[in-house]
């Protein structure tokens, strides 16, 4: 006896409307593959490049009432970004990170579309000019890549250095934005 | 290896839901027929409301069948009516149940729930007792009485 898609969708809708969900997620198709996207009542909370097994991580951080449901606002902005018609995002975020990470991510959000910045320069902007390596760690653990554009942060010599989604994706995002790349 | 059951983690609700939504709907159809869909939604809403208060991830299947049984009994506006029986326990083989299961709709609701949970979903009597809010003995008696009633109905139809 299988639950029909209608019945399933109705249940998910009512569960959300009644405020019974700690965190919802969806998998959004994109030119760089399926993106695992999660949001709480406060806003967008996670984007992962590798969808498998992320529900457990959500349950640990946000609570066990994890439910899949469409995230239309986020999907629309991401679609527009990948179409090249959107250069900044207009989404509330639910960032639950340590204060230093929050400072760095706030500065990161200001790096403009199509531009790059070095780890050291970003460190200087948060008043820690010698903390380039620590900034690298913050980029590596960025909970909301793409929206918080850690792909725009590169090495002092212009090399792409690293990216949680893989260097190939970092390069594709920068190319999409028309950034000038040395490597 | 010692299984540390006390700390068996609670799975994300989505996984629990995908794991049980179909068989719970099947169970409620047997108890309620066409009205099963509303009861099914109510079952999973109740589960979701209680889900963050669970202390561990054990016995979730029996737990959701318990909720479904309560919802069905509410729907039928019935308290589980547990038969008092001094008769010998009647049991069924799985194959025999398949032959008789189309007749379960004629059973009183508590017997129907007990029989379907035992023979349709393979729950232990202790779990059926939880679902019915009864003792294990009473759950066994309800299933047993249901089995006898099924056989009588079957003989009349035969």
Image: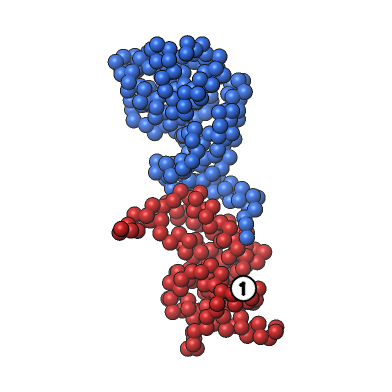
Quarter of the picture containing the C terminus of chain B is bottom right
Q: Is residue A122 visible?
A: no
Quarter of the picture containing the N terminus of chain B is bottom left
Q: Is residue A71 visible?
A: yes
Q: Nearer the viewer, residue A179 or A24?
A: A179
The picture places residue B119, in percent across and down from the top left corner, at: 54, 72
Judge from the rendering whether residue A102 lies leftward or rightward of residue B24; answer left or right.
left
Badge 1 marks a residue whose secondary structure is: helix
Q: Residue at x 50, y 23 (%)?
A: A168
Q: Is residue A156 above or below residue A169?
A: above
Q: Is residue B58 above or below residue B153?
A: above
**Residue A158 sits in which quadrant?**
top left
Q: Residue at x 58, y 30 (%)?
A: A30
Chain that appears red: B
The picture places residue A104, in percent across and down from the top left corner, at: 37, 22
Where is mark 1, residue-wise?
B98
Judge from the rendering whether residue A80 lies leftward or rightward of residue B19; answer left or right.
right
The picture places residue A122, in percent across and down from the top left corner, at: 38, 16
Q: Is residue B9 above or below residue A72?
A: below
Q: Is residue B133 above or below residue A13?
A: below
Q: Residue at x 42, y 28 (%)?
A: A142
What color is chain A drawn in? blue
Q: How crowded is the residue under tag 1: few (<14 C-alpha within 10 Å), some, or many (20+)?
A: few
Q: How many marks?
A: 1
Q: Residue at x 39, y 33 (%)?
A: A96
Q: Chain of mark 1?
A: B
């Amino acid at each position: 006896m299988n639950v029909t898609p209608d019945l399933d969708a109705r249940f998910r809708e009512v569960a959300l409307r009644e405020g019974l969900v700690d965190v919802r997620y969806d998998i959004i198709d994109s030119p760089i593959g399926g993106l695992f996207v999660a949001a709480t009542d406060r806003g967008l909370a996670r984007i992962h490049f590798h969808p498998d097994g992320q529900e457990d991580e959500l349950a640990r951080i946000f609570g066990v009432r994890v439910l899949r449901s469409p995230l239309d606002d986020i999907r629309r902005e991401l679609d527009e970004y990948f179409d090249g018609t959107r250069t900044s995002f207009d989404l509330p975020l639910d960032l639950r990170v340590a204060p230093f990470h929050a400072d760095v991510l706030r500065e990161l959000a200001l790096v403009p579309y199509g531009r790059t910045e070095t780890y050291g320069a970003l460190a200087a902007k948060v008043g820690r000019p010698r903390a380039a390596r620590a900034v690298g760690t913050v980029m590596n653990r960025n909970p909301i890549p793409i929206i918080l554009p850690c792909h725009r942060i590169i090495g002092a010599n212009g090399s792409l250095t690293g990216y949680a989604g893989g260097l190939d994706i970092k390069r594709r995002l920068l190319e999409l934005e028309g950034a000038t790349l040395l490597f | 290896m010692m299984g540390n059951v006390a700390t068996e983690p609670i799975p994300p609700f989505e996984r629990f839901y995908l794991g049980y939504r179909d068989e719970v709907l099947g169970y409620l159809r047997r108890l309620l027929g066409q009205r099963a869909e509303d009861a099914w939604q109510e079952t999973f809403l109740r589960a979701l409301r209680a889900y963050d208060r669970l202390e561990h991830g054990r016995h979730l299947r029996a737990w959701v069948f318990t909720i479904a049984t309560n919802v069905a009994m509410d729907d039928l506006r019935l308290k589980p009516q547990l038969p008092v029986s001094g008769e010998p326990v009647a049991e069924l083989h799985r194959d025999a149940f398949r032959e008789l299961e189309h007749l379960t709709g004629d059973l009183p609701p508590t017997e129907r729930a007990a029989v379907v949970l035992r023979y349709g979903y393979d729950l232990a009597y202790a779990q059926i007792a939880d679902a019915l809010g009864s003792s294990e003995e009473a759950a066994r008696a309800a299933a047993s009485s249901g089995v006898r009633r099924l056989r009588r109905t079957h003989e009349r139809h035969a």
